[in-house]
Image: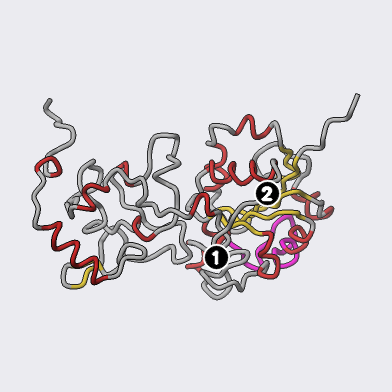
Amino acid sequence: MPSKPAKFQIVWLQGITCNGNTHSFLNDPLLGSLLDKVRFLYHPILPSQMSLRELVVKIPKSDLLIVEGAYRGDFERGGAVMEKLLPALAARAKNIVALGSCASFGGIFKEASPESISGIVYDKSEATGPLAAMREKVINLGGCPAHPEWLSFVIGMMLNKRKVALDELGRPKELYAYTVHNGCLRNDYFEWKVDSRSFGTKEGCLYYEQGCQGPFTHGSCNKILWNGVASKTRAGTPCFGCTEPTFPKTDLFRTKTYMSIPSEMPLGVPKRSYLALAGAAKSFHIKRLEERLIDDHS
């Protein structure tokens, strides 16, 4: 009988992390079928072939190295500092995924020590991280956390030996060519400049008052829904741009304006054109957009 093909081998290494991307991955509805096709040489939670200490000693070859969490050179894992451990594992990996905004760009943890913490390739948007020289084989999946199906998509492409088309920041175009605004159920309100005045409601656009960054944030959050049903904007919460190298920003949940006009325009829209369209839209009153979608008393 012919022998079974070797399973796709993955090493999952954590830097400075809150474990958010691990927990996100464990919520993937297709996790069971994915685990039938791959083998974790090391994962901090899932059953693995090696302990962390064995990983540090053996530095095995892998088909995919997944890095979760921000990088700091003197941070230790299994008695080894990341400055030595990460490049050693990366050199023996065929592919690398920076999973989440911390691994991709530095993320929230970078705020604690801006000079010493970064992503594995990018420090914010500058390619000065420890694996910058290997960035041709690194895929960045920004998000806080990254959607589990984004990682499943990338692994599936690798299993089928398909090339993943990437943008200028090493993110899959299939997932990040859109903005979060694409697919948002509030687009009618956006187009006709009908504001949302509070969080948690179904009505109104969150861009004009509540600080929503969806119109200039790359991501498929409103196309590939969380748990198949929701996104921040569908739940009445503004997007806060967690897939971008600029994350985290300060003064969230409030739109910065200049003379009542949002200071940051939707991606690719000139301010002069926006002002002309906004003025025209504001002159209309569309009754259906001024009513509750669901009457609590009905």
Whether residue 36 is in magenta: the answer is no
The residue that appears at 55% across and 64% down in the rendered structure is 169
The three-letter code of the residue at mark 1 reads: Glu
Image quadrant where residue 72 sits: bottom right
Image quadrant where residue 271 sits: bottom left
The three-letter code of the residue at mark 2 reads: Trp
Quarter occupied by the C terminus: top left
- Image-based side of 250 in relation to 108, left or right: left
In the image, 298 versus 24, the foreground residue is 298
Q: Are marks 1 and 2 in contact (CB under 8 Å)?
A: no
| x and y, in percent, of residue 171 in the image | 55, 57
The span picked out in magenta is: 70-86
Q: Which residue is mark 2?
A: 12
Q: Which residue is mark 1?
A: 168
Figure disc tally:
2
Give whichever of discs 1 and 2 has the lower sequence position.
2
The residue that appears at 62% across and 70% down in the rendered structure is 129
